[in-house]
Amino acid sequence: MTWMCGCYGLVLLVLGVMGQKLPTRDEGLFQMQIRDKALFHDSSVLPDGAEISGYLFRDSPKRYYFVVEEDNTPLLVTVTPCDAPLEWRLMLQELPEDRSGEGSGEPEPLEQQKQQITANEGTELFTYKGNDVESFISTSSPSGLYQLEIISTEKDSNFKIYSTTTPESDQPYPELPYDPRVDVTALGHTTVTLAWKPTPTGSIMGQPIQYCVVINKEHNFKSLCAAEAKMSLDDAFMIAPKPGRDFSPFDFVHFGFVPSENDFKDRSLTTNRALSNKMSRTYIPKPKVADIQKICIGNKNIFTVTDLKPDTQYYFDVFAVNTGTNMSTAYVGTFARTKEEAKQKTVELKDGKVTDVFIKRKGSKFLRFAPVSSHQRVTLFVHACLDAVQVQVRRDGKLVLSQNVEGVRQFQLRGKPKAKYLIRLRGSRKGASTLKVLASTRAGGKQPFPALPEDTRIKAFDKLRTCSSVTVAWLGTQERNKYCVYRREVSESYGEEHRRREQNQCSGPESRRKSEKVLCKYFHSANLQKAVTTETITGLEEGKSYLLDVYVVGHSGHSVKYQSKLVKTRKYC
């Protein structure tokens, strides 16, 4: 990726404006400045402790700057993509030695400052590519000129940036509770009831909080601005920016204009036409209004969504919004399918095809398998993703199988000419159940689910723990499969109850962040007594807790997760 040149005049602004230097914030001046949102519209200077909104044309990068004058300064920079994945990086350049911010000498010529800034490209501190809300945080940052470069390579896009040198005291984003998931507590033909844990920012810290619920039929959103962008009148361009307000003069270089103080106002009309042409080239039809809704409900943490369509899958997201700062945090969204209007029918299984099954708490589901040809046996695979389920199979009315199933189980049933099989699945008393079921009359061939050992626990070796690594082992089988290891840092209060809630064996590696991936490798052993493998996971932080997951991936792509393991590095070495 080639990053275009930034706005050097703005660097001069950064070096010369004392009120915008991050570590020396005048709180009274700051409160006055942030009330006037237009103050930052034209500027590529990042304000300390305030969130700004921006807009990117595709493949046209922007640069933002700020100065840290003192060493050992805390620093937090958060970038929120709204419409599309973004690429951004944070660079550090040393300040010129004769510019301390306190001097009273004459400013250096602009060309000389350009040479000073561009002579050394600087140190790259952080890079990210994706559509997650991502942050750079440092408890002790050196002084210097910080430069944030940001670009959208997919389409024109909105975004938000927040930066502060007082992250411990500011806390503008609402904090998520220990369990950030949105739960579906009741399901009807046209209604879905949602519940979630309240944010500590409102219940404990007393901040003004309201919750906003977003409902749509396509996918979950990772930020509120992403949902609002989808709801806008034009998905490609929310509001056409006005020249001189949403763009600095330097942005018009990309449209073929050379800005100057005398003729900038005269070019407004021409620039508007250029903007209109840009918009027409990237226009994407807006979604239907009925396809996405946002409802803000105050500080309640239980809400029933009404007027939904029967037998339709919906995605639900909840956002905690600090009404004082208008900044928000996303809970872990969920999805659910409303009930059918007619009486529930028996699900027909197709020979050799995997079927996803959802069973509500204490509920039951009936499946029917009717092979079209004569067969000697039927192989039944049942993958219980969460808690154990009860499986009963009747062949032509006669009970031939009744067992409780955890994880992946394979059953061999004796066949019979023109036989029909009725499978009853009974859910858990603890909560809803999700399963994958496959029935097949085909002998031999590769199995859809990977083979598993009887013990799917991950063992950690306490004596091999260090301040930056842990060593773990798990069992394999005689079948050569791919194993992928993932790690995630968790809080000190994270315990077995949290781990059990997240133990969805059907949730595969595709649901994980790329940054959480440790490695993937193939492994098997002809001797089951030796079918064990070890791995040392490095690059961890001292005294931190991590949740480790191992996924085994079968030949057809179906994966099964081993039991998660909670580990902690040593604090002193």
Image (cartoon, helix red, strand yellow):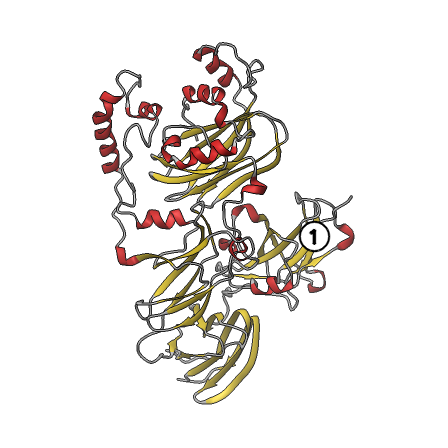
Q: Nearer the viewer, residue 318 or 62?
A: 318
Which residue is located at x 43 percent, y 88 percent? Answer: 396
* Occupied quadrant, residue 294: bottom left
Q: Is 487 left or right of 300, judged from the image as shown?
A: right
Above or below, 137 against 534 in this view is above
Judge whether 149 appears above or below 236 on screen. Answer: above
What residue lies at 71% left-to-right and 51% top-to-bottom? Answer: 471
Asked if residue 259 lies left or right of residue 501, the reply is left
Q: Quadrant of the N terminus?
A: top left
- In percent of width and height, residue 160 lies at 42, 40
The answer to whether residue 319 is seen in the rendering is no
Residue depicted at x 67% and y 49%:
544
The amino acid type of the residue labelled 1 equals Lys
Choose top left, top right, bottom left or bottom right for residue 248.
Answer: top left
> Image check: 483 left or right of 419?
right
Residue that appears at 74% across and 48% down: 570
Q: Nearer the viewer, residue 260 or 525?
A: 260
Residue density around tag 1, few if under 14, some if 14–19, many if 20 or more, within 10 Å: many
| Residue 258 appears in the rendering | yes
Q: Position of residue 149 (x, y in %)?
A: 45, 31
**Residue 409 x %, y %:** 56, 72
**Count of numbered tags:** 1
Dot 1: what SS?
Answer: strand
Q: Which residue is mark 1?
A: 568
Residue 69 vs residue 255, the one in the foreground: 69
Q: Quadrant of the C terminus?
A: top right
| Quarter residue 279 falls in | top left
Please state which of residues 508 and 36 is positioned toward the viewer in this rendering: 36
Residue farthest toward the front in the current orientation of the protein: 28
